[in-house]
Image (spheres, helix red, strand yellow):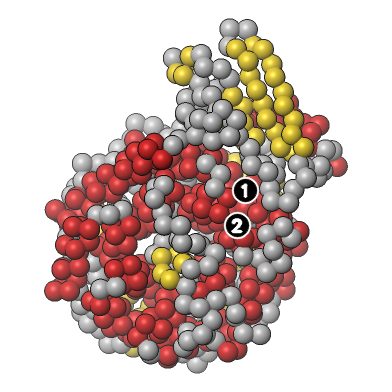
Amino acid sequence: EGLYSFVGNLSAVAVVSQGDEEIDGQASARAMASRTRPGGDDSAIFLKKEEEGRGPRTVFFALDDAPRKGGSKRTSSLDYEVKEAAKAFSPAEFATMSEAAAGTAPDDAEQRRRADAVRRAMKHAWTGYKEHAFGRDELKPVSGRGSDNWGGLAVTMVDSLDTLWMMGLKDEFDDAERWIDANLRFDRAGDVSVFETTIRELGGLLSAFDLSKRRVFLDKAVDLGRRLAAAFDTPSGVPTGTVSLRESSSSSKRSGGGWTSGNAVLAELGTLQLEFRYLASKSGDATLAAKANRVFEKVLALKPPNGLFPIFISPTSGQVASRKITFGALGDSFYEYLLKTWIQGGKTETALRRAYDAAVQGLFDRKMIQRSSPSNLAYVADLDNGNYVPKMDHLVCFLPGTLALGAYTDPEGLASKRATRDLDLAKSLLYTCVQMYERSPTKLAPEFVNFRPGKDFEVASAAPFNILRPETVESLFVLFHLTKDPVYRDWAWRIFQAFDARCRTPFAFGSVTDVRRTGQQPEDRMESFFLAETMKYLFLIQDPDIPPDFDLTDNVVFNTEAHPIAVLGPTGNHISRALLS
């Protein structure tokens, strides 16, 4: 069956390879590799089997002695593991898996070829946007028309700035800068989402400033940030979901009505801090950081059982207003920002790290980490009113990257029991996320999957679409950056190839309505995050020329929209004294 990768239940990569002969008209791959976990005492097992007409097959496993369900050792089911691994990938789909063993990993020239392919795809989409929707929020990739779904703030342009810069597309960056300087205004927008406008628009401007040091981006960010800051003016300091930029006052959705019944969403109220703290530091306006920090101070004081927060908080009282817990939609990036805000502040605001570690521990204590059958894939279930919901959003696929970053920055050290546990979980969850792509006929993942006994998972009939989300490639980038294991590059390359094959249009790239059906045309929708996040991560994971001082653990943080900004350090007006202990 060619070359397969299997990491879901193991402490290291395990691969199966055959010789160089052709299988079903496709050349099989030749490399195999493993990466054992830091500090692990793994034993290597090699199996060789001669198969008539197919040459030798070599299987490598790096195993620990942890028991499976039912108490059996992992080695007792090697045959089964190999068969499950064999389902994952078809011949020649991984031409190269790793640099170990046969030494056939892609060299820098091959990585630059891949990175350039992603750059060309980005340029294709940007050209379509510039020619047909320049200054509009979004490009419709099939009809070639522009639309304004986010208040008419040129969201795709601003969201794409740092991607253009990091890909070396400086002419395109300069064109956007000139348009922004001359045309971008915020006083004409009505009600906008505080969360989406902060992570896409404010984050995009701040990252463009951080990278280029061009003042126009900071000036625009200060204007926008002060208008958005009105959302924090509630009795509790917990922000409203929307704000009117035109009036610089919080929206009428503060209470009553709306699909949240006036409550603030956990992922929204807790995913503003990186941006407002950075803006406070660079503008000198300490009130911006104080407002954002107050949200964490207020919410962390709730001290929920097991460190896990329900998805709704009342802006009026500051108290919880739900019993649903999830690391998917409505919950996800709150936990991401606990960790990243701690890193942004020079790892001094220990209350943030403590809350992050408590939440991860809560995943285990509340048994939200579940396993599928028959393949024993790890996934994170939802908890709704105390009941487990066996589904996993694609949005949850941010979590492997966050867990890995948490492990590599663990105050107890990377070799500690906690960090080892969290890194193992990161690798297992990421394998499941990759399988959401690999087991789809289109090689694209759906919005979420339901887990079924005996079937692992099924595409949810209510959400079979793919809207070009970034979370899996985000985690692949983080895991590669931290571990240097080239398997993550290869998986990301396959995802890029699927996007390029299934989603490309004459103008850009479009969403797919049903990942179960091949041969369909993309739909007329391209979210700005495809250029801001998905393309950026796909590029950075392949690019061999990232500066050596680009360190996710110490000097740069990516906001949840993939906008990188420099770590601010332990002193300055962004620090919360209340979070220091």
Local SS, label 1:
helix
Q: Residue at x 46, y 32 (%)?
A: 441
Q: In this rendering, would 374 be left or right of 261?
A: right
Q: In this rendering, would 383 be left or right of 222?
A: right
Residue at the spot of label 2: 404
Q: Is residue 311 visible?
A: no
Residue at the spot of label 1: 427
Compared to residue 453, the image places residue 202 above or below, namely below
Image quadrant assignment for residue 522:
top left
Tally of numbered tags: 2
Compared to residue 116, the image places residue 414 above or below, namely below
Circles 1 and 2, Cβ within 8 Å, touching? The answer is yes
Image quadrant assignment for residue 191:
bottom left
Of residues 573 and 261, the one nearer the viewer is 573
Residue 528 picture location, percent across and down: 32, 58
- Whole-angstrom CA distance, mark 1 to mark 2, is 8 Å
Amino acid type, residue under disc 1 in the picture: Lys
Of residues 332 and 580, the one nearer the viewer is 580
Residue 65 picture location, percent across and down: 81, 42
Residue 333 picture location, percent across and down: 52, 66
Quadrant where the N terminus sits is top right
Residue 509 is labelled as: none
List the single residue furthest toward the right.
71
Q: Residues within 10 Å of mark 2 (few under 14, many from 20)?
A: many
Q: Which comes sooner in the sequence, label 1 or label 2?
A: 2
Image quadrant assignment for residue 383:
bottom right
Amino acid type, residue under disc 2 in the picture: Ala
Q: In this rendering, would 484 be left or right of 192?
A: right
Quadrant where the C terminus sits is bottom right
Q: Residue at x 24, y 49 (%)?
A: 123
Q: Residue at x 41, y 69 (%)?
A: 565
Compared to residue 217, the image places residue 475 above or below, namely above
